[in-house]
Structures are given as structure tokens and as C-alpha cells.
């Protein structure tokens, strides 16, 4: 190595050391509150003594305090804010530089829930049963012939929708080896979020209203219909017209269907316009369109999803670990169960239009 090369090497090394010192200084100054490590939490809860890491316990005790219930190490409440998307593109291409942001409670559904992207209202922290009054018939306005004329009284008609907690639960099994691996943290979070997001999506779209399920949109009484036979641009614009005629917010009308129907309509030209398709640039009838495998086959629905209310009881999920499963003990696996209390209310069913058996 000649003198010039040696000088360049030392200069580069000095710059790298200075950058490392700067990063360390910034990291030291950055505020960092207690964090939950899910892999560590699942592993500790599977132990007979349920001994938790101090940082995990601090977060869980605070969640119980805010929910005004006693802390229970056997059934800890996992705060919604602990569920955030940890996957940030490609790590080597910049993901290592991205900080993990804590999402708002409503954002718990967004990574996997199409109904949340479509605009459903989500409220957390419910305690008792929730009654939502709604107007089903408005008062009648009138014009008076002159100043001596009397107005005819009219009264609005009210109805009430009552939400009660419905329990959605799922059991997942993790190996102890996975719980000890460094990448288990992101996997456990992601799996729990997908489980909850899917359960809520199915309930919102097609909950049967029986056997403990909420009543979903496609089952709700009063939803308008549109023929799905050879569905074309005229049919989708008719769906949009029916929604608008029901006085929903016209700009918030969206379409929701399955990936198969999107493929079908992306290859079906609009009549009289040979350059555009029925499903064009992620829009149908010039309104945003979404797809989900939770939508029943050959089905499409249109409407303002802000007229669907999702109520979630409590401020957190309930996570339970079974450390005494004899089969799991022999195999070295951990059984985990997550429980969510929620219900769905379709506030104005007539503002939605569904098309079935689409061909």
C-alpha cells in the first residue's frame, strides 16, 4: 500500500468512526419506553411459574391499569398499540434505518383488513352494551302560504341498533425453538394481527348473525340488489346510482369484490368505449374498488362503508398461554389463544347494493 492509498484508507476509517459515534449519540438521546417482546412473552408465559421479563410485565400492568381491571399473568391484556407492522421493505435496502411507529387503535386492522381500508368506523374501549339510535324517517318540511298559515307538525321516526359483545377467538401453536429465535418476534405479531383482522373482516362482510357471530353486511336486511348476470359497466353504474339515491355520501361510495371478479371485469370492455374496462385502474364506475378473499365468491358490493360500525370491547386483546398441555410438553410446543370481543352494526343497509352470482 503506497502513502496515498494509506492516507485514503485512514480518512475513510475516520469518517466511519465519526458516523458510528454520531449514531450512538442519537440512539442514546432517543426516548424509548418499555416495549413488549412477543417471542419472549410467549416463552415466559409457557413456563409453569409465569415469570415475565420486567419490561414486558411493566407494559402489561399499565394496560390493565388503564383498562381498570386487575393484572392477571395468566390472561394478560395486550394493548392495541403493541401491534404494529414490523415488516419494512427489504432490510438491506433501508429497512434497518426505519423506526417502528406505534399505530392508533383503528390502525390495528389496516395491514390486513380490506373493510378498514374501505372506511368502516371502528371504536374501541367499549364497556357495556351499546345502543345506537338512528332516524328511519325524517320530518316533513312545508312552505307556508302566508304569515297567517299554520305549520303541520311532523315527527321523525327513530329506531335503535344494539351491539353486544361477540367473542372471536383463535388458537395458534408455536414451537419453543421458534419462540427462542430472533425472527419470532415479527412472526408472532404478524400472525396475531392477521388472525384478528380476518375475523373482523369476515364478520363485517358476511357474519351470519347466528352461533355467536355478528350480522354482516351481506346478511343484513334492507340491502339493495343488482343482477350479476353478465355484469357490465351499465350494471355497476346502476349500483352506484342506487347507493346515491339512498342519500349516502356520494364521494365515499366504493366497490368491494373478489380477486376472481376483478380479473373478470378487468378484461370486460365498457360498452361504447373500446379503450376502458369495467374494472379499470383499481376503480369501478369511477369509484375506488378493493378485493378480498373474505368476500363470497361471485359477489360484489357497493356503498359507503362509513355506515358500518365496528365496536370493540376493552382496550386490548386477551392473550392466554396453556403451559400444561401434555401433548405440547412432549413435542416442545406452546399453545396460545387470542380473544377479541366485538360486534358489527350496519347503520343504513339501504345505502348498500350487492350483486350476486356474477358472470
Image (cartoon, rainbow, N blue to C red):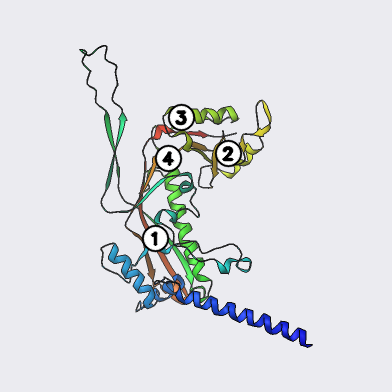
Residue in view at x 47 percent, y 64 percent: 189
Instruction: Using the image as rendered, state which of residue 151 and residue 220 is in the foreground.
Output: 151
- Residue 130: in sight, yes or no? yes
Q: CA distance from mark 2 to mark 4?
A: 21 Å
Judging from the image, what secondary structure is the residue with disc 1 in?
helix
Judging from the image, what secondary structure is the residue with disc 3 in?
helix
Location of mark 3 (residue): 244
Q: Nearer the viewer, mark 4 or mark 3?
A: 3
Residue 59 lies, with reference to residue 262, above or below; the image says below
Judging from the image, what secondary structure is the residue with disc 2 in?
strand
Q: Nearer the viewer, mark 1 or mark 4?
A: 1
Of callouts 2 and 4, the N-terminal one: 4
Quarter of the image where one finds residue 60: bottom left
Location of mark 2 (residue): 283
Q: CA distance from mark 3 to mark 2?
A: 17 Å
Instruction: Using the image as rendered, state which of residue 266 and residue 195 is in the foreground.
Output: 266
x then y, percent, for residue 39: 46, 72
Q: CA distance from mark 1 to mark 4?
A: 25 Å
Residue 72 lies, with reference to residue 288, above or below; the image says below
Location of mark 1 (residue): 80
* Outermost right residue: 2
Quarter of the image where one finds residue 337: bottom left
x then y, percent, for residue 96: 57, 69
Location of mark 4 (residue): 217
**Quadrant occupied by the N terminus:** bottom right
Q: Nearer the viewer, mark 2 or mark 4?
A: 2
Amino acid at each position: 500500500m503506497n502513502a496515498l492509498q494509506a492516507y485514503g484508507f485512514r480518512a475513510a476509517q475516520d469518517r466511519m468512526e465519526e458516523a458510528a459515534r454520531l449514531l450512538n449519540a442519537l440512539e442514546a438521546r432517543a426516548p424509548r419506553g418499555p416495549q413488549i417482546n412477543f417471542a419472549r412473552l410467549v416463552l415466559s408465559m409457557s413456563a409453569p411459574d409465569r415469570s415475565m421479563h420486567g419490561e414486558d410485565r411493566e407494559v402489561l400492568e399499565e394496560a390493565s391499569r388503564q383498562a381498570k381491571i386487575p393484572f392477571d399473568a395468566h390472561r394478560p391484556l395486550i394493548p392495541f398499540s403493541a401491534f404494529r407492522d414490523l415488516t419494512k421493505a427489504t432490510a438491506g435496502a433501508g429497512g434497518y434505518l426505519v423506526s417502528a411507529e406505534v399505530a392508533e387503535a383503528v390502525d390495528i386492522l389496516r395491514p390486513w383488513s380490506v373493510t378498514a381500508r374501505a372506511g368502516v368506523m371502528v371504536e374501541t374501549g367499549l364497556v357495556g352494551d351499546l345502543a345506537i339510535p338512528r332516524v328511519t324517517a325524517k320530518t316533513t318540511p312545508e312552505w307556508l302560504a302566508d304569515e297567517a298559515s299554520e305549520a303541520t307538525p311532523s315527527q321523525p321516526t327513530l329506531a335503535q341498533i344494539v351491539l353486544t359483545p361477540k367473542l372471536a377467538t383463535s388458537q395458534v401453536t408455536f414451537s419453543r425453538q421458534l419462540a427462542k429465535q430472533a425472527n419470532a418476534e415479527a412472526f408472532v405479531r404478524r400472525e396475531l394481527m392477521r388472525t384478528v383482522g380476518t375475523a373482523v373482516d369476515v364478520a363485517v362482510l358476511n357474519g351470519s348473525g347466528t352461533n355467536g357471530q355478528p350480522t354482516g353486511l351481506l346478511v343484513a336486511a334492507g340491502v339493495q340488489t343488482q343482477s350479476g348476470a353478465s355484469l357490465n359497466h351499465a350494471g355497476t353504474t346502476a349500483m352506484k346510482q342506487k347507493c346515491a339515491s339512498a342519500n349516502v355520501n356520494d364521494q365515499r361510495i366504493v366497490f368491494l369484490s373478489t380477486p376472481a371478479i376483478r380479473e373478470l371485469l378487468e378484461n370486460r370492455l365498457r360498452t361504447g368505449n373500446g379503450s376502458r374496462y369495467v374494472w379499470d385502474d383499481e376503480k369501478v364506475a369511477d369509484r375506488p374498488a378493493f378485493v378480498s378473499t373474505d368476500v363470497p365468491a361471485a359477489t360484489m358490493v357497493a356503498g359507503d362503508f362509513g355506515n358500518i360500525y365496528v365496536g370493540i370491547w376493552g382496550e386490548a386483546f386477551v392473550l392466554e398461554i396453556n403451559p400444561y398441555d401434555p401433548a405440547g410438553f412432549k413435542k416442545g410446543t406452546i399453545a396460545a389463544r387470542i380473544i377479541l370481543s366485538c360486534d358489527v352494526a350496519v347503520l343504513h343497509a339501504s345505502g348498500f347494493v350487492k350483486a350476486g352470482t356474477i358472470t
